[in-house]
Image (spheres, coloured by chain):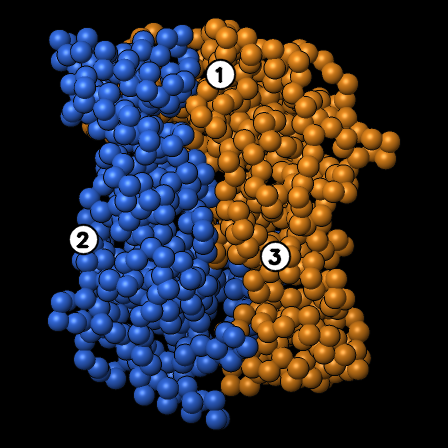
Chain colours: A blue, B orange
Amino acid sequence: MSALLTDLYQLTMLQGYHDCGMDETAVFEFFVRRLPPERGFLIAAGLEQALQFLENLKFSRSELEWLQKTGRFGDRFIASLESLRFTGDVHAMREGTIFFPNEPILRITAPIAQAQLVETRLINLLHFQTLIASKAARMVLAAPKKMLVDFGLRRAHGAEAGLLAARASFIAGFSGTATVEAGKEYDIPLFGTMAHSFVQAHDDEELAFEHFARAQPENAVLLIDTYDTEAAASKVVSLANRLKCCGIRIKGVRIDSGDLALHATQVRRILDEGGLNHATIFASGDLDEYRLGGMLAGGAPIDGFGIGTRMDTSSDRPYLDCAYKLVEYSGKPRRKRSEGKQTWPGRKQVYRSFDAAGRFEQDILTIEGDAHPGEPLIRQVMLGGRRLASAMPLAEIRAHAAWNLERLPASLRDLEGPYDYRVGMSQALIGLAGGMDQE
Amino acid sequence: MSALLTDLYQLTMLQGYHDCGMDETAVFEFFVRRLPPERGFLIAAGLEQALQFLENLKFSRSELEWLQKTGRFGDRFIASLESLRFTGDVHAMREGTIFFPNEPILRITAPIAQAQLVETRLINLLHFQTLIASKAARMVLAAPKKMLVDFGLRRAHGAEAGLLAARASFIAGFSGTATVEAGKEYDIPLFGTMAHSFVQAHDDEELAFEHFARAQPENAVLLIDTYDTEAAASKVVSLANRLKCCGIRIKGVRIDSGDLALHATQVRRILDEGGLNHATIFASGDLDEYRLGGMLAGGAPIDGFGIGTRMDTSSDRPYLDCAYKLVEYSGKPRRKRSEGKQTWPGRKQVYRSFDAAGRFEQDILTIEGDAHPGEPLIRQVMLGGRRLASAMPLAEIRAHAAWNLERLPASLRDLEGPYDYRVGMSQALIGLAGGMDQE
């Protein structure tokens, strides 16, 4: 991604730092200020893309020429950008880790120009994947052991949103995605059925089903709600019996409209009576964690769900109140005191302790070097612009998220809230902030 | 963008069409089913990117090799994809046109495999830019004659969302964006101020202001809410007087926290009393059309607004209920009858009539060829895979949107609704749909 994928003010500030010779080490941290009432926890995601961005940061010659033509910047400053690379350190929580407000999930330690320039894209990457992984995790909790598939590319906000939503929801526990490019790019399992247009393009619905089943003799999931859902289910039974002799097996059906739970119950009976006990029922259409929870509580015989728009846009809360803030410059802690937006100064660490059942009990937010009981969640992942380890496989990140979700206190697993989890501020951190306020 | 940026089911359906020899012409239309209660109209946007996508559609060799390795598709089918290009026709509303539910803004007429394959990305492009242009237009209506600047890249859903939100909001009437890459890519005016970190990195706030002003001697907009907003405004006055002799002029200040209207009033007084009547006040922080309307109704002396997250994510309604549906195949109109999701069959046209004051009076949705009074809104833009005209300049699209917004009935300009605009269905369309239902 271009280094120009940033806010103009990053470049004007860099010109300012350049002109007055400010090039000391700055420390920035990315965190979420507060949770929306509909969220009890967040899942950290996006670190891998953030590290790739930092590793590849550079201005191309044509970008620098374009910057020069804008007339906004000095020649010596633009020349200095030519050699700009990211040479700093990164500390972070592992992707898939559950976290809470004020806890940094990423820390950048670098010469101030580098650390400043990368703000916009780092927020852009970490915010979105964290938003989606956290939303998707609620669906996983609402429908344990069900197959959940990301169907959201079409209404995701652009191409990258669709691809990264597939990744983030897979981390949170989804079984896979319909987005082919995400399957190729991230090796996420692909799922797909058929669209209404395939049925509509045929003059006869059963013939459409047959054509599709012959083209996908092992994987055919037939969409049965184009005209009359139950009538179509009966056609599936008749077709399945006709095609059995050719070794073609109908894998399942999909229902995409109407009262999904009611249709599923009726369709299940039709399939079972027709000998298609193995055929699964897949449902889709405006689903989210609340609807999943409601349908499953009512015992709807649905085996899997395609979840699109409401997950890919995190529709009830399409953004988080997150920030990337300077916490230290030139060895001195820094603090912003704007109304309602005060920040905690200094490089931080989070210690998490667990109860006897292995569930999260409380977190302590403190300054680096101030040890507390519990597991420290922030580790160094990059030194001098180079990774300390190769990229973590996505399956491992997903397993780490599952491990985290298992250890979530019961009160935070509930869909409705209100949520309460204790993040204590250490005496060392409170003392540091208080001392700065008195200065 | 890769042709694999699509849903798996498009490819499995293509395999089905291929295997049974279905290659007749299909007609699909993209439209919005219904408006959310918070929207009285939509602005069509994204056509340019849609046409670019169609012009460049092809599978690369490595993509085909990857598809083959998935084991899901037949060899002859994959071989057929190698020569797949978009060779169809496109009819569309001009970008910047206001439209209403059920009115198609894009029609694709092409061999069914092509028309089917492009569904996902076409929706992805048209949905998002239309969503954002429509949200941004509400802000333009709430703050007429104010400078509105897109600040949203960081919390937009990925890189493409940030870039396209800059474009869509500029179409709707924003003055520009902070996103540098959008300035370069779309030639949109760039705006920027400074961040809190620049102030925090200095031990002294006034020195930070001075360094920034010296680096941007004509464009410095100083952020004054890092510690104490009014105290910082007084520092701006003292600095401006000191720097006047060096030919440096403070352009304005930005306030990003607290009660923006109250601070702006106090800061305006401080600036005016200090002789800085020319300096503008710019406000930002969690803004949307409701907050803009409220502040301006109260007479807040604010000259411009930076609007980020709530515009770039269309936060109150982060998606539209839109669809891309088959309306004709092999010369026969087609109709989906799923519960709550019935579609209107056939190729359509929209005629818009105007009242004596030049405002929109009503629209008629009908089938192509059934002429009605008023202006037909859908025109052919691509024939046989080639554009009929070169890309429309963004400034022209923006002017077209402004022309549309001027002609909006007063009831639709209101922020609160309820909204009501008459889209009548012609007898010809009703007859076509009714005849199909009887079959």
Q: Are marks 3 and 1 in contact (CB under 8 Å)?
A: no
Subunit of mark 2? Answer: A
Q: Residue furthest right?
A: B356
Q: Which residue is mark 1?
A: B335
Residue A152 appears in the rendering: no
Numbered label attached to residue B288: 3
Q: Are marks 2 and 3 in contact (CB under 8 Å)?
A: no
Q: Residue at x 42, y 15 (%)?
A: A200
Q: Nearer the viewer, mark 3 or mark 1?
A: 1
In the image, residue A367 sits, relative to residue A112, either above or below, namely: below
Q: Residue at x 28, y 13 (%)?
A: A235
Q: Amino acid at mark 1?
A: Arg
What is the x, y in percent for residue B23? 40, 9
**Mark 2 crowd level (few <14, some 14–19, many ≥20, 10 Å Cα):** some
**Mark 1 crowd level (few <14, some 14–19, many ≥20, 10 Å Cα):** many
Q: Quadrant of residue B152?
A: bottom right
